[in-house]
Amino acid sequence: MELFTVNGVYVCKARKGITMQKFEEALKNQLAMRKGSFAEHYSLKIFRNLFQYAHDLRQEYEEYYCEEYDSFSEFLYKKELWEKSNIRDAALADGDTVLKLHIQSSSYNMETLLDYDDSVLSMIIRTLEGIDL
């Protein structure tokens, strides 16, 4: 999984078929926390808030825009207003899930954590990169 920003919006790239249940299990394995501990509870809360209002851009494209735009890349460029360099840098494979995160809707604390504390953001990025979903 990868977390990056496009036009000031956080985006997460994952393999097709990701579910919150699979993600939480992989997260628990990645962080190797004691089951039921405060650390496990708090970490899951942070990541749940991160993905709480995410919406799947590829699913949106396939359901509503595939006839209007010739490709997912064109949809990102013309509808989502991604620069071509952002699309190229994202290195999206066919079927990758692309989640547009709406952290400002989920929690004031989440937005503050990501925008004002680089150490938390880098920890979240490293954690997501270690999850093979």
Image: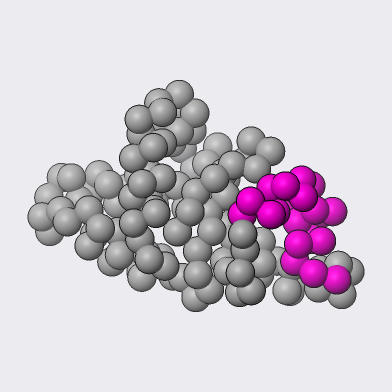
State the residue in front, 39 or 95.
95
Which stretch appears magenta? 70-90
- Residue 16's place in the image compared with 109, above or below, is below
Image spot of residue 75 (x, y percent): 79, 61
Residue 4 visible to an observer of this rendering: yes
Asked if the stretch drawn in magenta spans residue 42, the answer is no
Q: Can you say which quadrant of the picture contains the N terminus?
A: bottom left
Q: Can you say which quadrant of the picture contains the C terminus?
A: bottom left
23 lies left or right of 5? left
Quarter location, residue 88: bottom right
Asked if the stretch drawn in magenta spans residue 88, the answer is yes
Image spot of residue 64 (x, y percent): 78, 70
State the residue in front, 19 or 15.
15
Image spot of residue 63 (x, y percent): 73, 74
Residue 105 visible to an observer of this rendering: no
Furthest residue in direction right, as rendered:
68
Q: Main secondary structure of the magenta part?
A: helix
Tell me, what colour scheme is on the image?
A: one colour
Figure label count: 0
Image spot of residue 27 (x, y percent): 29, 59
User: Which residue is depicted at the point 41% across and 36% down?
Assistant: 121
State the residue in front, 54 or 127.
127
71 lies left or right of 8? right
User: Which residue is depicted at the point 15% across and 45% down?
Assistant: 38
User: Which residue is depicted at the point 53% across and 73% down?
Assistant: 16
